[in-house]
Image (cartoon, helix red, strand yellow):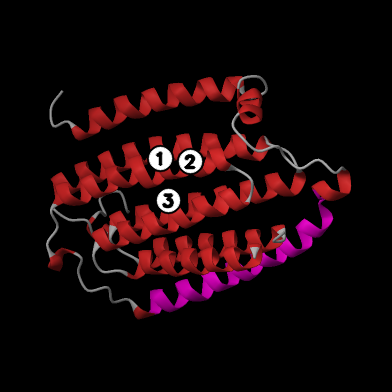
Amino acid sequence: MVSSSAYLILSATIFSIGVLGVLVRRNILIMFMSIELMLNAVNLAFVALSRHLGSLDGQVIVFLVMTVAAAEAAVGLAIIICLFRNKKSVNVDDFNLMKW
Amino acid sequence: MEILIFSILAVVAVVCSILVISQKSAVASALFLIATMVSLAILFLTLNAPFLAAIQIIVYAGAIMVLFLFVIMLLNLRRDEFGPEKRKAQRFFAILFVFLLLIGIATVIEVGVLGLKSAEDVSETVAPAGVEPLAQLLFTKYLFPFELASVLLLVAIVGAVVMAKRRL
């Protein structure tokens, strides 16, 4: 049996890659995909700890996280379509209306 | 054997997620994200969670990524709109801080997991596999969050339509 900490380290690695994507990329679509990556990494941590503790509560939480992720993707992509319609761009540096 | 499967899946997941954030074209990123999600789904299987593996593929790799690809195609981006990504200093500090973050999380995991009582210590029972125990929990202890999730999905549908429609 692979130890739980191996799964958790893998989850932390994927989460960090997601954070890096949000920090480095300027394309709003790829930033959004990085957020999905982070959500997936957290799901993996939940499932690993659910096995570690021998309880199913973690898996229920993952189910709810997936629901929230689906809702977030739908609304987020609608916002991206709105932004693109107004600015004709997907580069986040162009969206500075509320910056100052 | 299990270690071998885990190692292969872990390498695939990490490499594909690095490719997600390093691709120039958004379509390629989306395809690598699907590969990451599929390998995570197989990891869920190895963690004795077949139901979550199924909905990971159906909801994430299916529904959400189709939505992503649909929006990418709808925006119909040209090559030059991705733009040159300069900002060397920002990239350097981002990598530095993410590295520190990873070290921090890894330390917390190593310290924290040792403190947790594992299932083998508490009793011999491993979490039962399959849908039924999960459904049992979902419709008794977590009934209220479950109902809230359905309301959330309804709100998300209305919100997406309101925002994506030009004129109501």
Give the chain of mark 3.
A
Residue at image position (69%, 61%) is A2
Q: Are marks 3 and 2 in contact (CB under 8 Å)?
A: no
- What residue sits right under mark 3 in the picture? A36
Q: Quadrant of the C terminus of chain B?
A: top left
- What residue sits right under mark 2 in the picture? B54
- What residue sits right under mark 1 in the picture? B58
Give the chain of mark 1.
B
The answer to whether residue B48 is above or below residue B128 is below
Q: Is residue B109 on the magenta stretch?
A: yes
Residue at image position (43%, 26%) is B152
Classified by dominant secondary structure, the portion drawn in magenta counts as: helix
Q: Judge depth for marks 3 and 2 and give the one in front.
A: 2
Left or right of residue A63: residue A85 = left
How far apart, in angstroms, are the residues tagged by discs 1 and 3?
Answer: 15 Å
Q: Which residues are magenta?
A: B89-118
The answer to whether residue B15 is above or below residue A34 is below
Number of other residues with Cα within 10 Å of mark 1, as a class: few under 14, some 14 to 19, many 20 or more = few
Left or right of residue A88: residue B116 = right
Residue at image position (34%, 65%) is A25
Q: Is residue B130 visible?
A: yes
Q: Are marks 1 and 2 in contact (CB under 8 Å)?
A: yes
Under mark 1, the amino acid is Ile
Give the chain of mark 2.
B
